[in-house]
């Protein structure tokens, strides 16, 4: 008999959602909230959910082909090595790439700098039917921009309300917004950076600036805490994911995405032709 598939012990979305009592400093980054079954079992559930995710994504895509306006946007924040790229590869990689709209937000280009900071973000919002993925996002405006003092403090202070208003606008437009922050520990980030430096196949991921960012660890943690406190809203809460165990972070995000898609409750679009008539026409094309 097939072994019984382990599943979540608890409502993981509830456990990871950033509410008013959230305390980033107290968060255990190596924990696996809601999951007690270990890594091998996680891989097995991941595979099972991958199939469902793929089916749900196809429904979303099909819905838009027939006039639907829904979309999903998975926003990924996290410091270097927190695993954003791995989520794209291992979670998003389970669905048809045609249905995905991936955007990466790095240092603004000269052209982007001439516009409002949300200009480049608006252009990358997912069209109906797509799963959009933001690898970094408009939230860098209250992270790197704040920590590095790239704009005046009083202007930076206005960004929280602006970001919340922008998120509300996205949600009102029919997009389910899932805001995920991958929170790696200081020790684990050190290990991952060391690995990047010791392995030639990882050098491409390394940037000497990563150490400058690491040197500002406390300032980044404070910026994240402030971001969580001021921008986790009911319509689009933050989910703070312990990220020291990559397999856990990926499993948790798979679950958040699966739920978002299930909640859309999409069936398959009705045919705008008569299948019986078409079958008869097909039969008539037979050659002997
Ligand atoms: P990576 O994601 O490792 O390719 O690095 C992208 C870099 O772009 C990170 O160091 C971010 O801090 C930086 N970045 C992203 N958005 C902004 C922004 N709005 N202003 C300045 N730097 C940014
Ligand atoms: Mg990097």
Image (cartoon, helix red, strand yellow):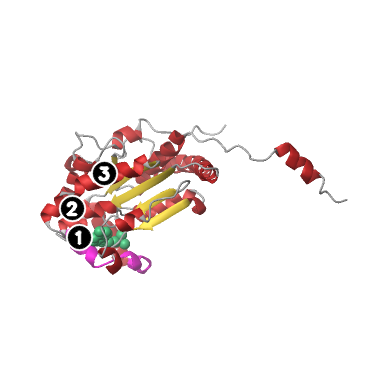
Q: Nearer the viewer, residue 19 or 245?
A: 19
User: 10 Å neighbourhood of mark 2: few (<14), some, or many (≥20)?
Assistant: many
In three-dimensional space, the C-alpha distance between marks 1 and 3, rounded to whole angstroms, equals 28 Å
Measured along the vertical axis of the image, is residue 81 above or below residue 51?
A: below
Residue 189 appears in the rendering: yes
The label number, if any, that marks residue 220 in the structure image:
2
The residue segment tinted magenta is 199-217
Mark 1: C-beta under 8 Å from nearest atom of ligand 1: yes
Please name whichever residue, 192 or 175, is drawn nearer the observer in this view of the structure. 175
In terms of depth relative to the viewer, which is nearer, 275 or 181?
275
State the mark number for residue 165. 3
Residue named by callout 1: 213
Q: Residue at x 20, y 45 (%)?
A: 161
Q: Position of residue 230 (x, y in %)?
A: 19, 42
**What is the CA distance from the residue labelled 2 to the residue labelled 1?**
8 Å
Q: Secondary structure at mark 3?
A: helix
Q: Residues within 10 Å of mark 1 (few under 14, many from 20)?
A: some
Please report the residue visible at 43 percent of the width from the left and 53 percent of the height from the top: 101
């Amino acid at each position: 008999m097939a072994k019984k598939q382990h599943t979540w012990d608890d409502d993981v979305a509830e456990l990871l959602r950033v509410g008013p009592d959230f305390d980033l400093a107290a968060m255990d980054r190596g924990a696996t909230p809601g999951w007690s079954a270990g890594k091998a079992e996680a891989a097995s559930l991941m595979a099972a959910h991958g199939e469902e995710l793929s089916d749900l994504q196809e429904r979303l895509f099909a819905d838009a082909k027939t006039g639907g306006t829904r979309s999903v946007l998975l926003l990924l924040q996290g410091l270097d090595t927190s695993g954003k790229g791995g989520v794209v590869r291992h979670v998003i990689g389970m669905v048809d790439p045609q249905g995905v709209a991936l955007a990466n937000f790095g240092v603004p280009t000269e052209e982007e700098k001439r516009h409002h900071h949300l200009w480049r973000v608006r252009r990358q919002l997912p069209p109906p039917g797509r799963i959009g993925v933001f690898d970094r996002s408009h939230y860098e405006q209250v992270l790197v921009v704040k920590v590095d003092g790239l704009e005046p403090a009083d202007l930076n202070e206005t960004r929280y309300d602006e970001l919340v208003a922008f998120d509300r606008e996205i949600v009102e437009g029919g997009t389910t917004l899932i805001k995920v922050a991958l929170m790696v520990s200081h020790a684990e980030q050190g290990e991952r950076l060391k690995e990047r430096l010791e392995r030639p196949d990882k050098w491409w991921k390394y940037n000497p600036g990563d150490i400058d960012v690491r040197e500002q660890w406390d300032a980044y943690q404070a910026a994240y805490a402030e971001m969580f406190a001021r921008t986790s809203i009911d319509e689009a809460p933050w989910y703070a994911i312990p990220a020291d165990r990559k397999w856990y972070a990926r499993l948790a995000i798979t679950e958040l995405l699966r739920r978002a898609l299930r909640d859309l409750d999409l069936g398959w679009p009705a045919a705008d032709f008569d299948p019986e008539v078409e079958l008869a026409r097909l039969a008539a094309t037979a050659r002997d």
